[in-house]
Amino acid sequence: LFPYTTLFRSEALRAAGLSSAKARYILELAQRVSDGRLNLEAMQEAPDADVIAALVDLPGIGQWTAEMFLIFGLRRPDVLSLGDAGLQRAARLLFRDDAELEH
């Protein structure tokens, strides 16, 4: 992306309500997809661990976001996001207040 193009797109994303940081994250994601460093089509067949590794390499994307992409973006049926706050809360409600889910 040319600097003026990035600035324009960043301003447009900010005008849509995104924070400066989230605008930067989205532009970096778009740049990597555009230049081929991140191949979303190849992720369809890639192992979960490889998809997660590729995604967490992006700024602003962590383990939970990558797992949500596996579940909702790639429709992987067997992903258990142990760091999910709702899942952790449910475990505490069902078992005990100090219950923690582990791998």
Image (tube, grey):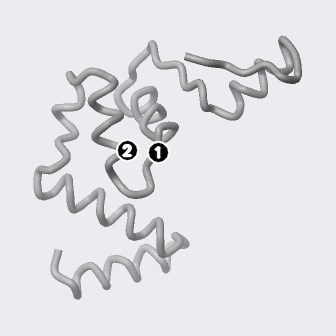
Q: In this view, does 58 lie above or below 28?
A: above
Q: Quadrant of residue 85?
A: top right
Q: Which residue is drawn at 47% across and 38% down?
A: 63
**Residue that numbered label 2 is attached to:** 56
**Nearer-the-camera pick, 46 or 103:** 103
Badge 1 density bin: few <14, some 14–19, many ≥20, Cα 10 Å:
some
Badge 2 density bin: few <14, some 14–19, many ≥20, Cα 10 Å:
some
Q: Which of marks 1 and 2 is nearer the N terminus?
A: 2
In the image: residue 10, left or right of residue 33:
right
Q: In this view, does 36 lie above or below 45?
A: below
Name of the residue lying farthest toward the bottom: 4
Residue 61 at x, y = what percent? Answer: 43, 49
Name the image quarter holding the N terminus: bottom left
In the image: residue 22, left or right of residue 99:
left
Name of the residue lying farthest toward the left: 36
Q: Residue at x 44, y 14 (%)?
A: 77
Q: In which quarter of the image is residue 39?
A: top left
Residue 44 at x, y = what percent? Answer: 23, 26
Q: What residue type is labelled 1?
A: Gly
Name the image quarter holding the C terminus: top right
Residue 65 at x, y = what percent? Answer: 48, 41
Q: How far apart are marks 1 and 2 (CA)?
A: 5 Å
**Residue that numbered label 1 is attached to:** 62
Which mark identifies residue 36? none
**Nearer-the-camera pick, 33 or 102:** 102
Q: What element carries label 2?
A: helix
Q: Is mark 1 on a helix, strand or loop?
A: loop
Q: In this view, does 7 lie above or below 89?
A: below
Q: Residue at x 88, y 23 (%)?
A: 97
Residue 74 at x, y = what percent? Answer: 34, 28
